Image (cartoon, rainbow, N blue to C red):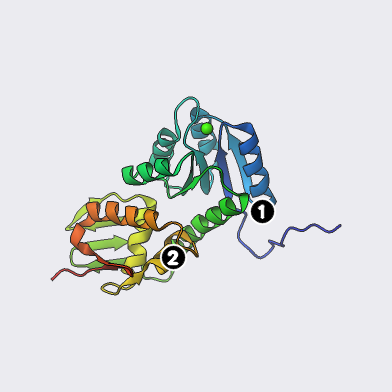
């Protein structure tokens, strides 16, 4: 039998993923699947172990269970994001839990509710990594800085200033703002935003989109993002 793995000779090096999950069966299943997809995977089983593995493994992405021994996924997220911004896919037990976390703006970039299919998990992982690549491509294209009535977006440094003062956005809020800023004043549809920011091709995450628009508005000014009901959102220039 020949190896079924796609050839990677001309591609970028395999992305590194840290899987943090205290249930051994789930941890191993996720790890095995991601390895089969060509990722380099390291495992951790509790909060402190996750922070240590993050330092030694230097992952490009973290799959992070919320409820963990030691300290929980929120604390892990805080500690690792303080070291280096990294996309985080959070595993939660209930949809209500996800809504709560999105509202808190804890810094995770996407959420998967248990039980999830491995296919869905892999799709989310790939979508998150594509977002990071798109940001890098934007920087390379020279469109790295957007200025709009006191709102300054620095795509290279992933920083945002409002009236000269830096505001701290989560990685996902930042990518949403970039997607809106691609065409200031133009309504970007929900489908387009879901696809560009989350890589999803269906509307399953519409609450996620609305929640992130809400937290983004709280940080950059409510009137900067216009809602067009049933259609989408637009980044507004101020007069
Ligand atoms: Ca758990």
What's the CA distance linking mark 2 and mark 1? 22 Å
Say above or below: 114 vs 4: above
Is 112 displayed left or right of 148 in the figure? right
Q: Is residue 51 left or right of residue 231?
A: right
Locate the N terminus and report the quarter of the image it occupies: bottom right
Label 1 residue near ligand 1, CB within 8 Å: no
Foreground of the two, 192 or 172: 192
Position of the C terminus, as image quadrant, is bottom left
| Crowding at mark 1 (Cα within 10 Å: few <14, some 14-19, many 20+) | few
Q: x%, y% of residue 190?
A: 38, 66
Q: Which residue is mark 2?
A: 196
In this view, which residue lies farthest toward the left?
239
Image marks 2 and 1: residues in contact by CB distance under 8 Å: no
Quadrant assignment, res 13: bottom right
- Is 232 on the left-hand or right-hand side of 111? left
The answer to which of marks 2 and 1 sits earlier in the sequence is 1
Residue 138, image x, y percentages: 42, 67
Residue named by callout 1: 37
Tell me residue 150's x, y (percent). Answer: 18, 63
Task: Kindly tell me whether residue 61 is visible in this rendering.
Answer: yes
The residue carrying pointer 2 sits among few (fewer than 14), some (14 to 19) or many (20 or more) residues within 10 Å by Cα, namely many
* Residue shown at the point (36%, 60%) measured from the top left: 176
Q: Residue at the spot x=50%, y=26% of the render?
A: 69
The location of residue 226, given as percent across then percent down, is: 24, 66
Question: Of all residues shown, which one is farthest toward the right?
Answer: 1
* Of the pair 204 and 63, the residue shown nearer to us: 204
Judged from the image, the secondary structure of the residue bearing numbered disc 2 is helix
């Amino acid at each position: 039998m020949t190896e079924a793995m796609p050839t990677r000779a001309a591609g970028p090096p395999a992305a590194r993923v840290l899987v943090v999950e205290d249930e051994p069966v789930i941890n191993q299943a996720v790890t095995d699947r991601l390895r089969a997809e060509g990722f380099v995977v390291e495992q951790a089983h509790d909060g402190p172990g996750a922070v240590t593995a993050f330092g030694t493994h230097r992952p490009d992405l973290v799959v992070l269970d919320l409820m963990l021994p030691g300290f929980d996924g929120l604390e892990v997220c805080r500690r690792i994001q303080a070291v280096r911004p990294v996309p985080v896919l959070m595993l939660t037990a209930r949809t209500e839990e996800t809504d709560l976390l999105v509202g808190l703006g804890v810094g995770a970039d996407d959420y998967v509710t248990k039980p999830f299919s491995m296919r869905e998990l892999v799709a989310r992982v790939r979508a998150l990594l594509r977002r990071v690549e798109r940001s890098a491509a934007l920087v390379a294209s020279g469109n790295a800085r957007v200025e709009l009535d006191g709102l300054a977006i620095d795509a290279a440094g992933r920083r945002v200033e409002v009236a000269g003062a830096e505001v701290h956005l989560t990685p996902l809020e930042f990518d949403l703002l970039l997607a809106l800023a691609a065409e200031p004043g133009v309504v970007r549809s929900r489908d387009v935003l879901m696809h560009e920011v989350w890589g999803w091709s269906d509307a399953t995450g519409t609450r996620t989109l609305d929640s992130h628009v809400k937290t983004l508005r709280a940080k950059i000014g409510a009137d900067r993002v216009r809602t067009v009901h049933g259609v989408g959102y637009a980044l507004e220039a101020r007069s």
